[in-house]
Amino acid sequence: MNRAWLRYHLPSGAFVGISSAVILVGVGLLVYFGAYDIAADAPHTRPVYALLESLRDRSIAVRARGIVPPADLNSAGRVSIGAGLYTEMCSGCHLGPGVERSELSQGLYPQAPELAMKSDLNPAQQFWIIKHGVKLSAMPAWGKTHPDPLIWDMVAFIRKLPGMTPDAYKRLVASAPADHDTMMKDMPG
C-alpha cells in the first residue's frame, strides 16, 4: 500500500487524521526517548533555532502592541536610575561598554544579547521583555519584583547604551542612585 492508494481509497478527512496521528506519535516518541539534546553546550539545529527565534520575535511584537512609553523616557533621571538597575540586575549577562564577558554570560544558550550593540527592538518591546521575561532563555520576568516605572527606567538606560563609550558607561553607573529597593518602597503602588 502506498500513499497514493491511501489518498484515493480513504476520505480526505481520514487521510489528514491518520497523517496527523502519525506525526503526533512520532513527536511523542522523540520526546519520550529524549532524542533531542537540550544541553546548553549543544546548539540547536539551524531549523530549530530559526523556528524558536521567529516564535520569540513574533510573540514579543504581538504582545508589545499598545504599550505606550512614558513621555519622559529620555529624561536624565530615568536614565540614571536605569543605569543602577542595569548594573545590578542585567550587566552579568548583557554586559556593557568595556565590560568583559562573565562566566555566566559565556555559559548561556542562547547567548544573551549584548545591549550596547544596536537593537531593532522598540521601547514597548524592550519594556515587555524586561517585565515578562523570555522562556528558555534565562531572561527573568522582572515585573514580578519591580513596578512599571522602574522597568521604564531600565528601558531608558538600555536605549542609551548603543554607542556609549566605556568611560561614559562607568561615569553613568557611578552616578546612579545606590539602592533601588528603597526607591521601590517609596513608589506608589
Image (cartoon, helix red, strand yellow):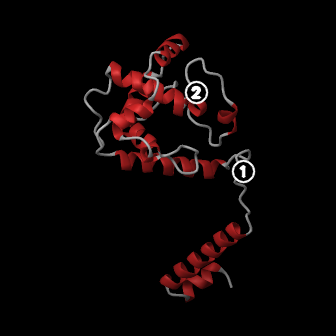
Residue 33 location (% of width, % of height): 74, 68
- Which residue appears farthest toward the top when viewing the image? 167
Question: In which quadrant is the C terminus drawn?
Answer: top left
Cα separation, mark 1 vs mark 2, equals: 23 Å
Image-based side of 104 in relation to 97, left or right: right
Residue 142 location (% of width, % of height): 46, 43
Question: In which quadrant is the N terminus drawn?
Answer: bottom right
**Image quarter for residue 131?**
top left
* Mark carried by residue 95: 2
- Which residue appears farthest toward the bottom when viewing the image? 9
Q: Amino acid at mark 2?
A: Leu
Residue 46 location (% of width, % of height): 64, 47
| Nearer the observer, 38 or 81 | 81
What SS does tag 2 mark? loop
| Nearer the observer, 43 or 136 | 136
- Which residue appears farthest toward the left when viewing the image? 71
Which residue does the image show at 66% across and 27% down from the upper left?
A: 101
Viewer can see residue 75: yes
* Mark carried by residue 7: none
Badge count? 2
Q: To which residue does mark 1 refer?
A: 39
Which residue does the image show at 34% across and 21% down from the upper left?
A: 77
